[in-house]
């Protein structure tokens, strides 16, 4: 990771990292002022669903893959099969989210490792896309431990991950260290909005933790 990428990644990891979830018709930058899909339990309550994040380090894990940008994402258990765009940082320092369009796509945060590299690769997606209806990650909460996630890479290979946990957390308590903190093995984070919907978006984020399959 270059020094510029590392700085941007650390900036994101220490910020609120709240972005829009497609509740309205804002642009990507405007959406980033609300929150795409991240969080921690409301008011410190316990998380819902599988609550144990992936362990840092550990033995018996798959070997890291060469750096290659993700171009597709498949999650068979919930019917996701989407192109993947690249996302950076918005003007206010929050992570960009995919644009609100009828043909919704997931987006890889380009200052995170590519899928299969050591560290947490981060992919964001909407749960709803305004007047267009459901977003690409609308069923993310249905994932369970052991479900498969496949990231198609630019070099023609596929990085296959296994879900280790799924968490629904309040945006105000987004666990930045657990999501963006350094890990010694290849891991993946899928993030979207969840919980109660308000006039400006959703109160929670849904975070899927996964590790590279051996």
Image (cartoon, helix red, strand yellow):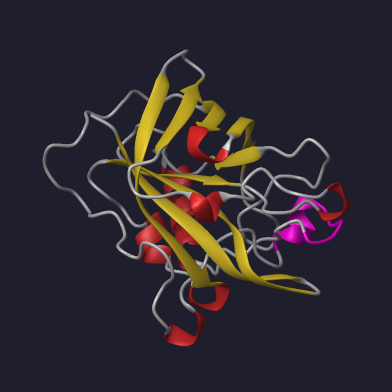
* Left or right relative to 136: residue 169: left
Q: Where in the figure is residue 101, as x and y percent of width and height?
A: 82, 42
Identify the residue at image location x=78%, y=51%. Answer: 129
Does 70 lie within the magenta span? no
Number of on-image labels: 0
What is the quadrant of residue 90 in the picture? bottom right
The C terminus lies in which quarter of the figure? top left
Depicted 170 relative to depicted 2: above or below: below
Q: Is residue 82 above or below residue 202?
A: above
Whole-percent x, y for residue 187 in the image: 34, 43
Q: Is residue 28 magenta?
A: yes
Q: Residue at x 74, y 49 (%)?
A: 134
The answer to whether residue 114 shows anywhere in this view is no
| Residue 153: image location, x then y, percent | 48, 22
- Write the start and end of the magenta stretch as one range: 23-32
Question: Would residue 160 be seen by someone viewing this image from the given angle?
Answer: yes
């Amino acid at each position: 990771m270059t020094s510029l990428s590392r700085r941007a990644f650390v900036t994101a990891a220490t910020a609120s990292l709240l972005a829009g979830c497609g509740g309205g018709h804002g642009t990507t930058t405007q959406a980033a002022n609300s929150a795409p899909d991240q969080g921690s339990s409301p008011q410190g309550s316990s998380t819902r669903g599988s609550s144990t994040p992936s362990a840092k380090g550990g033995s018996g894990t798959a070997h890291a893959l060469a750096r290659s940008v993700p171009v597709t994402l498949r999650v068979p258990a919930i019917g996701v099969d989407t192109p993947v765009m690249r996302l950076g940082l918005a003007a206010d320092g929050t992570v960009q989210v995919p644009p609100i369009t009828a043909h919704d796509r997931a987006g890889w945060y380009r200052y995170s490792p590519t899928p299969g590299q050591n560290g947490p690769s981060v992919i964001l997606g909407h749960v709803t896309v305004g007047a267009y209806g459901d977003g690409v990650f609308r069923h993310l909460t249905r994932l369970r431990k052991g479900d498969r996630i496949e990231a198609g890479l630019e070099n023609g290979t596929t990085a296959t991950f296994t879900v280790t946990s799924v968490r629904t957390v309040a945006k105000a308590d987004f666990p930045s260290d657990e999501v963006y903190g350094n890990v010694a093995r290849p891991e993946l984070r899928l993030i979207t909005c969840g919980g109660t919907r308000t006039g400006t978006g959703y109160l929670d984020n849904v975070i899927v933790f996964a590790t590279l399959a051996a």
